[in-house]
Amino acid sequence: MSPKLTYRQSGVDTIEAQSFVHNISSHVKRTQKNRQLCNAFGLFAAAYDLSAYQHPVIVTGTDGVGTKTELLYEQDMLETAGKDLVAMNVNDILTTGGDPLLFLDYLGISNLKKETPRITRLIAGMCDYLESCNCILAGGETAEMPDVVPDDLVELAGFCIGCAERDQMIDPSRVAVGDVLVGYASDGFHANGWSLVRRILREHAGLLTQEELRAALAPTRLYNDVVNQMRAKGVAPKAYAHITGGGLPENLERFLGDKGAELQVPFWQNEPVQKVLQYVDEQDRFHTFNMGIGWVAIVHPDQVETAMSVGPESHVLGCIRPGAGIRVSVAS
């Protein structure tokens, strides 16, 4: 009779998994300084009390980091991957006018014991950003899948839950001809377009120094400071757009309907980025990258000056006009 096997012998260690949850508790606690779950962390599901809201509306979003993760792992920039994961989700929640409340992550790995140091660093990066935007790491899933997930790879996905007062939700249907688009600077390519960047780097070996590559891999910027300062200064945006895959045109067209705009973005003063862009089609680049603008607020003309006083470097990109379609060019 063949010997009986354990789950651990098949490549999955549930005891190690329980130990991992305990070991990351200090990072989890960092995200619960201002908000608290209704129950304990680590149960089968997380609960949050919405009684502070009069007419709460739940908003949700899910996203990943994409092929940028390959380069982040090669450069040992695990914390950046965690920050990217949070920002790609939280920024989407912020476009609704909602507060990011709860965040959950999914990590798929081949061997937990081997990968524990790396995924702990991933979670540390997540918690750096979650702490800064007052969002709780409410739980997640660490799936140990030998023979399915390759060694030295971590599958990465995130999910965010937010809440907004019904009467304070951003309503893009209010956007009108003459409204102004104010753009806020990105910190780099963020987490979109990296399949193209990776191909360019393969085909043009030595294009970027290691220092330049690490600069180009800067994490996706969180724009909670823009949203918070807008509220504090009484600005009522008609719409927000998080500029991700599809660039400015596709991320604005999704809610403008039969209206459009002619946009001019400032030249992107980022040397590593410009080294890459020289190999990218001059039109396609606007549909692939954020081109230096990671966030856009659409405001009434009377509120432009105040809107430009918040957040990172800001620019008036253009005005809403009749007729569908977004066309983007670099300001001369």
Image (cartoon, grey):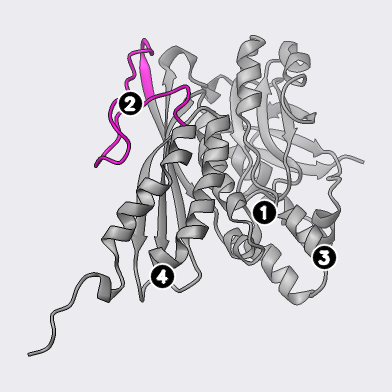
**118 lies above or below 324:** below
Task: Determine the secondary structure under disc 3.
Answer: loop
Q: Earlier in the sequence, mark 3 or mark 2?
A: 2
Residue bearing mark 3: 209
Q: Position of residue 224 (x, y in %)?
A: 60, 28
Q: Gap between marks 1 and 4, in whole Å?
A: 28 Å
Residue bearing mark 1: 288
Number of labelled discs? 4
Q: Gap between marks 3 and 1, in whole Å?
A: 23 Å
Residue bearing mark 2: 48
Residue ID at (34%, 19%): 50
Q: Nearer the viewer, mark 1 or mark 2?
A: 2
Specify the label residue 149 is tagged with. Answer: 4
Question: Position of 154 compared to 181: left or right?
Answer: left
Question: Position of 225 compared to 152: left or right?
Answer: right
Q: Identify which residue, 238 or 213, lies in the foreground.
A: 213
Residue furthest to the left: 1
Amino acid under label 4? Answer: Val
Regarding residue 245, the answer to whether it shows in the image is no
Q: Identify which residue, 83 or 326, lies in the foreground.
A: 83
